[in-house]
Image (cartoon, rainbow, N blue to C red):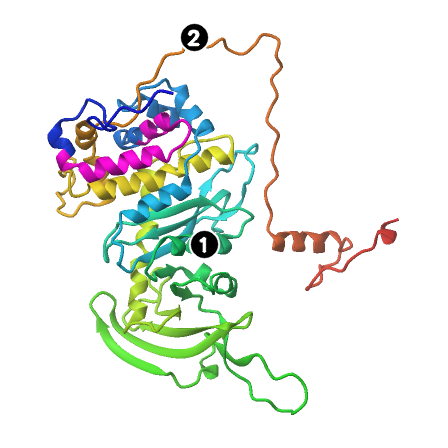
């Protein structure tokens, strides 16, 4: 088997100079290590990632083969996603090695949808949450969900460095997020702080991640009903009470005196009034106690984008002072989703199988980490209508990355022509791909069963549908 060309005698092509190797040594070593983790079709996959950086705007996925970095035929772009086998665990270890070993990481988790409305032959499609700016429209689409766990390297910045970016199976984003957090905790030595949106502020997520050495800061929905101290025992006989006194977020009459109350002026959010209660819990996760904070923004207009009252929950070790302010560091993961779908062309391909989509998605964290390592090496190249930046964002770094790629070259091998393909054999029949059904949630199946068991002209009863025996249908 032909070996990869060495980097200036150890892995690099002849397109770079010795001074480039000296200045960009860390970036070169990262690219070489990532190249070795891409598995089969690594050359085409790696050149495909460089093509993403070079091609700012493309109308279709195959146009990436027109980039100077992609030295293969256009069909190799699809074959790379068909034959590639990136090592996700090896890439995770590579990303973790780029971080300071004794630094406490701030992690942000979320999930998003890859919209595939008309791909009826694509397996694994389901109903996914998709935000919409149209008032009154349901935020739902059809596609595949992807869960992401990213490192937030700097506070108040737009950078988010994904460690894991994987497809959600069985419509359970909470379980996928807990499993990703488990993998990351096993790869690092310092207890991290993880930030989560309101969808993860539930009993299922706390139970799935209860044994993990990680602090969790979650935003809580404003209509929750939690439990406080356990109710007193009224009778000597029987089992002692398990559940506690109700604490309804929307009913202040159920609140008791706060354990901490403070009012101060925040430089970003203005005047705040914060009340903190300790020992609250979900009724389905009685052993997972939380510290809950109600943050009231006295100067907020009270709209959906700028609500007046926010609820946060802390699970883990003793929190720092004003721990609710740390939640603002979660937002860069939303910026990364926008950057990946737009500039990195993540959702541009219309691939035939979920496996191809997963291999293409594995390149998104690698591209982001590559840009992060090159952010201090590139020189800002703004477009005529853009203002210069001193601290480059991911988009501006990607915009100025072209000269770096020319300087450091590529670890991939030159492709070998194999002659003309014989084409499809004459007389061999072609089979159409089968249409795949949408994956439905358990709640949808329950409602559908209830409606089917209701006689015509009657409204379906609430609660669980009754079981109908086989003899009743006879």
Residue nearer the viewer, 373 or 336? 373
Looking at the picture, how far across and down is residue 299, in whole percent? 27, 70
Q: Residue at x 71, y 53 (%)?
A: 449
Residue nearer the viewer, 183 or 222? 183
Q: Residue at x 40, y 26 (%)?
A: 41
Q: Residue at x 37, y 36 (%)?
A: 37
Check disc 1 and report its element: helix, strand or loop: helix
Q: Are marks 2 and 1 in contact (CB under 8 Å)?
A: no
Looking at the picture, how far across and down is residue 38, in whole percent? 38, 33
Q: CA distance from mark 2 to mark 1?
A: 46 Å
Q: Which region of the structure is painted magenta?
A: 22-49
Q: Which residue is mark 1?
A: 177
Looking at the picture, how far across and down is residue 277, in whole percent? 40, 79
Magenta highlight on residue 32: yes
Residue nearer the viewer, 257 or 142? 257
Looking at the picture, how far across and down is residue 165, in whole percent? 40, 45
Circle 1 residues within 10 Å: few <14, some 14–19, many ≥20:
many
- In this picture, is 31 found above or below 317? above
Q: Which residue is mark 2?
A: 420
């Amino acid at each position: 088997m032909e070996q990869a060309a060495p980097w200036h005698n150890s892995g690099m092509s002849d397109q770079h100079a010795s001074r480039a190797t000296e200045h960009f040594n860390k970036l070169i070593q990262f690219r070489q290590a990532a190249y070795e983790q891409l598995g089969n079709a690594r050359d085409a996959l790696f050149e495909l990632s460089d093509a993403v950086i070079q091609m700012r705007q493309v109308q279709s996925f195959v146009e990436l083969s027109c980039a100077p970095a992609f030295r293969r035929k256009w069909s190799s772009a699809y074959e790379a996603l068909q034959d590639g086998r990136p090592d996700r665990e090896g890439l995770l270890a590579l990303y973790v090695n780029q971080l300071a070993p004794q630094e406490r990481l701030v992690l942000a988790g979320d999930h998003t949808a890859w919209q595939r409305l008309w791909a009826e032959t694509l397996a694994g499609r389901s109903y996914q949450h998709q935000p919409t700016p149209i008032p009154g429209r349901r935020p739902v689409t059809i596609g595949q969900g992807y869960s992401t766990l990213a490192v937030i390297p700097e506070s108040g910045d737009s950078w988010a460095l994904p460690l894991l970016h994987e497809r959600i199976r069985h419509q359970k984003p909470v379980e996928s997020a807990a499993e990703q957090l488990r993998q990351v905790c096993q790869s690092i030595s310092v207890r991290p702080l993880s930030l989560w949106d309101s969808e993860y502020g539930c009993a299922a997520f706390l139970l799935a991640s209860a044994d993990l050495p990680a602090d969790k800061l979650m935003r809580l929905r404003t209509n929750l009903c939690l439990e406080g101290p356990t109710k007193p025992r009224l009778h000597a006989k029987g089992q002692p009470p398990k559940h506690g006194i109700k604490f309804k977020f929307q009913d202040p009459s159920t609140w008791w005196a706060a354990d901490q109350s403070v009012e101060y002026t925040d430089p970003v959010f203005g005047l705040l009034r914060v009340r903190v209660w300790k020992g609250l819990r979900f009724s389905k996760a009685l052993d997972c106690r939380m510290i809950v904070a109600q943050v009231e923004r006295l100067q907020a207009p009270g709209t959906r984008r700028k609500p007046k009252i926010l609820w946060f929950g802390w699970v883990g070790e003793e929190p720092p002072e004003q721990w609710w302010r740390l939640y603002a560091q979660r937002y860069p993961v939303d910026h990364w989703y926008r950057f990946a779908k737009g500039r990195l062309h993540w959702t541009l391909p219309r691939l035939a199988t979920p496996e191809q989509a997963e291999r293409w998605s594995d390149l998104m964290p690698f591209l982001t980490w590559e840009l992060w390592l090159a952010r201090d090496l590139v020189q800002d190249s703004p477009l005529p209508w853009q203002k210069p930046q001193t601290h480059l964002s991911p988009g501006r770094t990607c915009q100025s990355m072209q000269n770096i790629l020319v300087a450091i070259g590529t670890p991939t091998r030159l492709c070998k022509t194999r002659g003309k393909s014989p084409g499809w054999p004459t007389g061999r029949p072609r089979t159409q791909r089968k249409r795949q059904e949408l994956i439905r949630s358990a709640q949808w199946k329950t409602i559908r069963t209830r409606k089917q068991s209701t006689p015509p002209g009657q409204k379906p009863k609430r609660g669980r549908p009754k079981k109908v025996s086989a003899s009743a249908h006879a």
